[in-house]
Image (cartoon, rainbow, N blue to C red):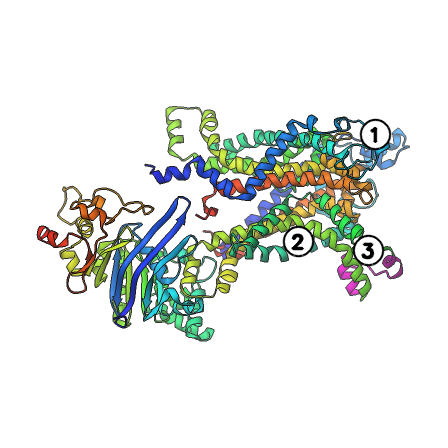
């Protein structure tokens, strides 16, 4: 029987209050919203959109930040501000796609392993162990090197690197859920195992997946930028932030803006997602709430 | 007045600030203990007994604060002393044992570690002497092979043994007041009985006062001289054990004692007190028990009941006792 | 004690199995790369027969499982193959480049630990104060920094603007030419001290600062956060209240009783970030022209030098596995509950 007190604590209003009272998380959230808006309306925000799509303006190379070019121009005379703005689409897209792929691989695998138990469970767990014993960056690099340098390959590579975390997470939940009464009841009625996994087990894992996912989003953006920096990901003339830092490397001592602003974009994006993820984790975990 | 009492609580109000409001957890007009007395503090879960004990030991932290009141211990008001003075008293003159003995001990250190440190701090002796005293303390609580126990970890000991360790730790510096918060609740019946016997035997040896907090009336009947009944943050009745069991004056105390099943009552419906414990965010006006009291009158809803004396250090907070006395007997 | 020994043995066994899996994966990846290693071995103007001979010489004409078996056999006996690019034994190449990376990683990790643990503890004890909020923001920011960008920003700041630290490399030109020191261990800090060459020591230290700082950022953030949250959790546990109830000093309660409990999960984080930074030296070595394993690996990847790639990958993965194992074992030693198989 839930009392009035329980209802108050579980209400959305309370969750929102927590979110609001944690100013950092709120800032992170706000920034992400800003980012989404920028990404959606990029062509209208960027003053020199053509620069983001391959246009060059050799006459205006290495202009320092000024009114015409808020972030300055790079070695091909392109407006860095415009490229950063359009690049937000790439970064967000990469993040979403990669997480989607990772979840697609990792979640069902974990749910099946956890629910089935026995040999299947053991095998899947050993495989995850092996994958997890690789330093993530290294594995991603290896896969990208194998598949060839391209942004899509980077996303696949990161998904291949990252799925074990979600498998572990979901598997843990599945193991504890499979003994619960409602699962046994479903079994007794004769619901097929696949349906049980899909209908009962996976939906109950949504909360930790969301928390983990929001924390990982930042890491994914960071890794794909790092891989692009190494030349394994986005190829010129894509306005991908990591690639921009890499191409600017040769000149950054004389033209600091070429490297600083794209990198700043990466930093603030990752920061925002990490703040959000951190805040979500605090909300979901009553221990750290500190009433 | 205060010299006779080892503990004298007056006008204590403790509150907790939460998201949804201020919880008025404790509101005690007066509660006192004489030297060498075993006082039981009973009540339902959430009635404020643990908060009271925490207030005495100065352990109210976080969102809780002591809004008003005085707690006189051995003549000094505990709420007005400095942290250093408090550190001197805690563990040395006032000792506390908690409900779950296994989680009261640090899992990554041996059980001997904390007790030797406590002894070293309060008795100002060196490590060897402290170890010796610790072994003695363990022996006093009937722990077998005390030297070995000293080097064991909490998870290697049973619940009963852990509780004995806690008691040994509490008694190691010869405190004047021992506060035991549900010492037997986490233990099974036979072990609990042993612990209670231990507590009773200690009384003979040491000049100790005990504040025993529990919701178990059976424990109170065995061990305590006097009983204080709490409800919703108030002390509603205080009386010598024999008298309260024979003839509880306050309606709540009455209901509480009646609801304990007795042998021979098989087949009869369990007596209970109607209603539920009120939310302490907005306690009822007047007497906090009035919504559930079968005898409630108009005055109960508006006026806080006075605390009247009914003989031999016996007090109750109710408007209607003189009338009820005729009805109950 | 039996349980502890069994636990360790079990852990090592598991580690070996995992390592095997790692070698299989790496081997498969390296072999699947569509390029012609034999041609690279011989050089750009090779004839067809020379390439064929090279293939035979390198054993590339055998079926894959046989190649794998041969490779593993050689690996275990100490023969890690010969680099296609440098024509040197891979193991010797690795031994030449490893110390630079290790020096970098160890220094960076030490910085992170020495700064991170006190920050985290202090932050947890003064929860919700201005300082605490500041530390939390710092920690999250540290974890969000792109390594390569941080390195460059530091270079801009300390080299270009302030001019107090060198741009790149391990040692300055002048020191290298005029006051050379013998490279005994490969760790410049140690070697300069052994040689008694104080000027070189200072120079080498100055070169180490920025790269180590860049490397330290991510672990610093992780460690600070982990210690803080562990401490908060422990400080809420009952035995801490008991300690307070007995008047024990705050310092004792926090730094001995609480911290020891909080260190266990933090150790995991430390080991993981050490392994992570070992792999991440890539980026730092690229920025600071640091001649370490990452530099060697980068060259190997570009020239598709598969024995070298295999060698580096297996080494790093093995270190990773080893570190994880060490952490489990150390945890068992610290936390008596695990030791006796709770």
Position of residue B308 measured from the top left corner of the image (x, y, whole percent): 18, 59
The crowd level at tag 1 (other Cα within 10 Å; few <14, some 14-19, many 20+) is: some
Q: Is B56 left or right of C191, judged from the image as shown?
A: left
Of label 2 and label 3, which has the lower sequence position? 2
Which numbered dot is residue C171? Answer: 3
Determine the secondary structure under disc 3. Answer: loop
Whether residue B163 appears in magenta in the rendering, the answer is no
Q: Nearer the viewer, residue C128 or B257?
A: C128
Residue under label 1: A57
Q: Chain of mark 2?
A: C
Part of the protein shown in magenta:
C174-195
- Mark 2 and mark 3: Cα distance apart in space: 21 Å
In the picture shown, does residue A159 fall above or below B80? above
Residue under label 2: C109
The crowd level at tag 3 (other Cα within 10 Å; few <14, some 14-19, many 20+) is: many
- Mark 1 and mark 3: Cα distance apart in space: 40 Å
Position of residue A95 measured from the top left corner of the image (x, y, whole percent): 63, 32
């Amino acid at each position: 029987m839930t009392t009035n007190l329980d209802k108050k604590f579980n209400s959305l209003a309370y969750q929102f209050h927590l979110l609001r009272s944690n100013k950092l998380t709120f800032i992170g959230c706000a920034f992400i919203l800003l980012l989404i808006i920028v990404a959606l309306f990029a062509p209208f925000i960027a003053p020199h959109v053509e620069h983001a799509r391959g246009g060059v303006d050799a006459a205006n190379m290495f202009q320092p930040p000024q009114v015409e070019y808020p972030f300055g121009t790079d070695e091909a005379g392109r407006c860095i501000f415009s490229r950063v703005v359009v690049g937000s689409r790439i970064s967000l897209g990469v993040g979403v796609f990669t997480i989607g792929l990772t979840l697609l691989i990792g979640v069902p695998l974990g749910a099946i392993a956890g629910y089935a138990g026995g040999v299947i469970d053991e095998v899947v767990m050993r495989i995850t162990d092996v994958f997890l014993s690789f330093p993530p960056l290294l594995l991603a690099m290896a896969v990208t090197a194998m598949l060839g340098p391209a942004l899509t390959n980077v996303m696949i590579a990161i998904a291949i690197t990252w799925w074990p975390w979600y498998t572990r997470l979901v598997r843990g939940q599945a193991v504890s859920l499979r003994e619960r009464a409602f699962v046994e009841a479903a079994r007794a009625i004769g619901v097929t195992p696949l349906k049980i996994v899909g209908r009962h087990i996976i939906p109950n894992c949504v909360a930790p997946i969301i928390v983990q996912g929001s924390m990982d989003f930042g890491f994914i953006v960071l890794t794909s930028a790092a891989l692009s920096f190494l030349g394994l990901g986005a190829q010129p003339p894509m306005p991908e932030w990591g690639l921009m830092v890499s191409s600017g490397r040769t000149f950054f001592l004389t033209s600091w803006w070429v490297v600083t602003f794209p990198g700043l974009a990466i930093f603030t994006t990752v920061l925002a997602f990490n703040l959000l993820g951190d805040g979500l984790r605090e909300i979901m975990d009553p221990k750290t709430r500190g009433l | 007045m205060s010299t006779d009492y080892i503990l004298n609580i007056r006008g204590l109000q403790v509150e907790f600030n939460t998201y949804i409001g201020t919880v008025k957890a404790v509101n005690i007009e007066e509660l006192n203990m004489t030297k060498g007395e075993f006082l039981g503090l009973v009540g339902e879960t959430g009635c404020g007994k643990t908060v009271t004990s925490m207030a005495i030991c100065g352990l109210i932290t976080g969102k809780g604060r002591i809004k008003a009141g005085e707690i006189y211990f051995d003549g000094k008001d505990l709420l007005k002393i400095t942290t250093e003075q408090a550190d001197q008293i805690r563990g040395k003159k006032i000792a506390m044992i908690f409900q779950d003995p296994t989680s009261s001990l640090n899992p990554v250190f041996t059980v001997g570690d904390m007790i030797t440190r406590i002894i070293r701090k309060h008795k100002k002796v060196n490590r060897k002497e402290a170890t010796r005293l610790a072994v003695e303390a363990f022996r006093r609580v009937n722990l077998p092979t005390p030297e070995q126990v000293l080097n064991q970890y909490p998870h290697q000991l049973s619940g009963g043994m852990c509780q004995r360790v806690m008691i040994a730790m509490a008694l190691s510096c010869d405190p004047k007041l021992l506060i035991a918060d549900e010492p037997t609740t986490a233990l099974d019946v036979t072990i609990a009985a042993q612990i209670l016997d231990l507590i009773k035997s200690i009384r003979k040896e040491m000049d100790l006062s005990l504040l025993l907090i529990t919701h178990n009336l059976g424990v109170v009947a065995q061990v305590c001289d006097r009983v204080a009944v709490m409800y919703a943050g108030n002390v509603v009745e205080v009386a010598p054990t024999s008298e309260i069991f024979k003839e509880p004056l306050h309606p709540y105390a009455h209901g509480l004692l009646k609801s304990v099943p007795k042998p021979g009552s098989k087949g009869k419906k369990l007596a209970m007190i109607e209603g539920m414990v009120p939310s302490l965010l907005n306690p009822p006006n007047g007497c906090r028990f009035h919504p559930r009291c079968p005898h409630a009158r108009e005055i109960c809803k508006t006026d806080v009941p006075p605390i009247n004396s009914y003989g031999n250090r016996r007090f109750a907070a109710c408007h209607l006792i003189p009338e009820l006395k005729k009805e109950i007997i | 004690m039996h349980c502890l020994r069994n636990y360790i043995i079990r852990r090592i066994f598991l580690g070996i199995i995992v390592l095997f899996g790692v070698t299989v994966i790496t081997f498969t990846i390296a072999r699947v790369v569509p390029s012609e290693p034999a041609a690279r071995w011989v050089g750009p103007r090779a004839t067809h027969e020379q390439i064929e001979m090279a293939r035979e010489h390198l054993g590339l004409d055998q079926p894959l499982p046989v190649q794998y078996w041969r490779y593993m056999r050689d690996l275990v006996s100490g023969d890690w193959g010969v680099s296609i690019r440098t024509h040197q034994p891979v193991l010797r190449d690795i031994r030449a480049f490893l110390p630079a990376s290790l020096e970098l990683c160890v220094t960076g990790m030490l910085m992170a630990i020495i700064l991170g643990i006190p920050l985290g503890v202090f932050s947890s004890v003064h929860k919700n104060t201005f300082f605490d909020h500041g530390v939390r923001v710092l920690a999250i920011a540290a974890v969000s920094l792109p390594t390569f960008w941080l390195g460059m920003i530091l270079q801009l700041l300390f080299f270009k603007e302030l001019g107090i630290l060198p741009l790149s490399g391990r040692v300055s030109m002048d020191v290298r030419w005029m006051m050379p020191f013998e490279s005994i261990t490969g760790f410049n800090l140690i070697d300069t001290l052994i040689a008694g060459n104080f000027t070189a020591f200072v120079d080498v230290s100055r070169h180490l600062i920025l790269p180590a700082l860049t490397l330290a950022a991510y672990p610093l953030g992780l460690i600070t956060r982990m210690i803080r949250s562990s401490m908060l959790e422990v400080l809420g546990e009952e035995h801490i209240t008991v300690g307070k109830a007995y008047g024990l000093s705050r310092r004792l309660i926090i730094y001995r009783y609480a911290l020891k409990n909080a260190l266990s999960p933090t150790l995991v984080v430390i080991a993981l970030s050490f392994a992570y930074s070992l792999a991440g030296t890539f980026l730092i070595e690229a920025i600071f022209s640091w001649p370490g394993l990452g530099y060697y690996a980068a060259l190997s990847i570009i020239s598709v030098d598969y024995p070298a790639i295999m060698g580096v990958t297996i080494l790093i993965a093995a270190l990773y596995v080893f570190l994880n194992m060490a952490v489990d074992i150390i945890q068992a030693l610290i936390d008596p509950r695990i030791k006796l198989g709770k």
